[in-house]
Image (spheres, rainbow, N blue to C red):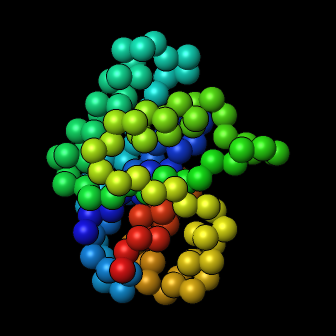
Amino acid sequence: MLIAGMFLKANEVRIVTLAGSRVSHQLVAPKVNKFTLVKNPSQSEVAQFGEAIVAYCDDHKVELIVLNRRATSGQGAGGAGTFLMEGVILALARINVELVHPATVRATDKRNAEFKDLKPKTVDLGKAYDLAFEFLT
């Protein structure tokens, strides 16, 4: 199963797509790792962003999208950009979309860190990798 971890932050989506199992997996499309939605986008810019996400999933035969669950209150709560991008992805995706809480990712990382040798060194790409890793069997 091909799983795309999409980490939403500010006005960017960082993407890491994985195939395989937790023990033995590989990166798919390592050159594509970011889509951006401009601040205060127009309707056509939002549509283009959505089309780019759908095209990425179609081109790479992604079967599941995993997004980070946004904080709804308190410090670090998700802003308007992440809210808009999450809504667009949920509305336009032709495949299942799962939301994962950061605490779930931390718990999985503690149990399975030895299997994450392909994890990118960039922090945001690492978080996208962790999201995809959550649904590997």
Front position in the image: 65 or 109: 65
Up the image or down, 8 lies above or below 92; here it is below
Q: In which quarter of the image is residue 39?
A: top right
Q: Which residue is drawn at 58% across and 31% down?
A: 81
Q: Residue at x 43, y 78 (%)?
A: 117
Whether residue 87 can be seen here: yes
Left or right of residue 65, residue 69 in this image: right
Left or right of residue 51, residue 133 in this image: right
Residue 79 pos. (x, y %): 66, 34
Q: Residue at x 43, y 33 (%)?
A: 88
Up the image or down, 128 lies above or below 37; here it is below
Residue 44 pos. (x, y %): 36, 14
Up the image or down, 77 lies above or below 101; here it is above
Front position in the image: 122 or 15: 15
Quadrant for the C terminus, please.
Answer: bottom left
Q: Which residue is drawn at 32% across and 80% down?
A: 21
